[in-house]
Image (cartoon, rainbow, N blue to C red):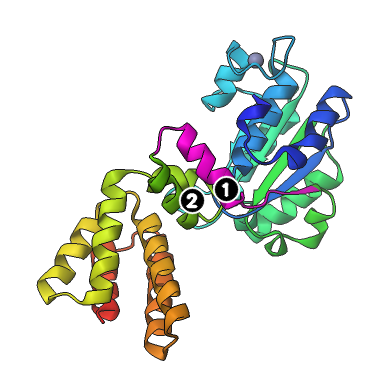
Amino acid sequence: MWNQIIGHELTVAPLKRAIENSALAQAYLLTGPQGVGKSLIAQTLAMAALCEASKKPCGTCATCQRIINDQHPDVIGLRVLPDKSEIGIEQWRGVEAKVQFQALEGDRKFIIIDDAERMSMSVANACLKTLEEPPSNTHFVLIAHDADRLLPTIRSRCQHLVVSPLPQSVVESWLVKQGSDAVVAKRVAALAQGSLQRAQRLAKPEVLGVLDVMTRDIQKGYTPLQVLEHAASLAILPEAPEVLDGLAVALRNMAVAQPTVRVLQRMRAVEEASQYLSTKGANKELILNELFITLAP
Ligand SMILES: [Zn+2]
């Protein structure tokens, strides 16, 4: 199962060693950009520690399966709820209550905190207090995009592992192994920013098709009616963030070829739209309408 973590052999080596030597740290901090495999590493670590098979983690025993399906009582996940902007104190209290008890099945528990930089201040302080007086046989794995946004006192209590974006060549050969055409793999790898997750979402004909049409149109121009059409089609596409990333790359290439204030303005508009789209309750169609009006050449 460790071998499903592609391209991060050096990062996971200390974790594998710690499992082999029964010397897991109390707390780990995994940092790196979105989609590079931090959650998979955290999950694999918990499986490696709790798996029932002799060759751990097997990925197939009942324990591993329940961890994969987020149903293991001793592997407790904490993340921002879909309708919230941060991890709230009531969520933390729920975790804290579980931490107080003995592990239900194995001999230890794992608390995996996704988006750790989005813990509210009261949660961050409560988390710090727990890390200062850690309950026995409980391991914390904090996952964050940006370590600098965590309390330094939390950072210093964790063993920090940096999960870097994968080299383009690794993403490209992975896509080919997944069955992508070589030309598509090369193109997608250049857009995926070192993330297999992003590459997988981009490497779909319908997503690349939308990206192609929009890239052509922001270079050649489009009518007001096409603005509405583009906004409507992108608003319902789950891969809209990846398409916007692709447009940003196209604009960056235009900026390299001919750096003008106008191109830079358009790049900024794409970045802003990406951010707005990810906010709670955003009116996607409206945001994208405005974006395509701004992007018109
Ligand atoms: Zn197993």
Determine whether 12 is above or below 213 in the image: above
Query: In the image, residue 39 lies at what x, y percent?
Result: 60, 40
The three-letter code of the residue at mark 2 reads Ala
Q: Secondary structure at mark 2?
A: helix
Q: Secondary structure at mark 1?
A: helix
Say whether residue 14 is left or right of residue 211.
right
Where, quadrant-wise, is the C terminus in this rendering?
Answer: bottom left
Residue under the point 79% across and 44% down = 130
Count how many numbered circles sit on residues in the image.
2
Residue 173 appears in the rendering: yes
Say whether residue 48 is left or right of residue 90.
right
Determine whether 286 is above or below 7 in the image: below
Residue 294 colored magenta? Answer: no
Determine whether 274 is above or below 194 in the image: below
Front-most of residues 227 and 251: 251
Residue that carries the numbered disc 1 in the rendered image? 169
Q: Residue furthest left?
A: 225
Query: In the image, residue 25 lies at what x, y percent?
Result: 84, 37
Residue under the point 41% across and 89% down = 260
* Quadrant of residue 221 within the rendered picture: bottom left
Residue that carries the numbered disc 2 in the rendered image? 189
Residue under the point 54% across and 28% down = 70
* Quadrant of residue 74 within the rendered picture: top right
Q: Residue furthest front?
A: 182
Q: CA distance from mark 1 to mark 2?
A: 7 Å
Residue 237 appears in the rendering: no
Tell me, yes or no, whether the two marked residues, 1 and 2, touch with CB atoms within 8 Å. yes
Crowdedness of circle 2 by 10 Å Cα count: few (<14), some, many (20+)?
A: many
* Quadrant of residue 265 within the rendered picture: bottom left
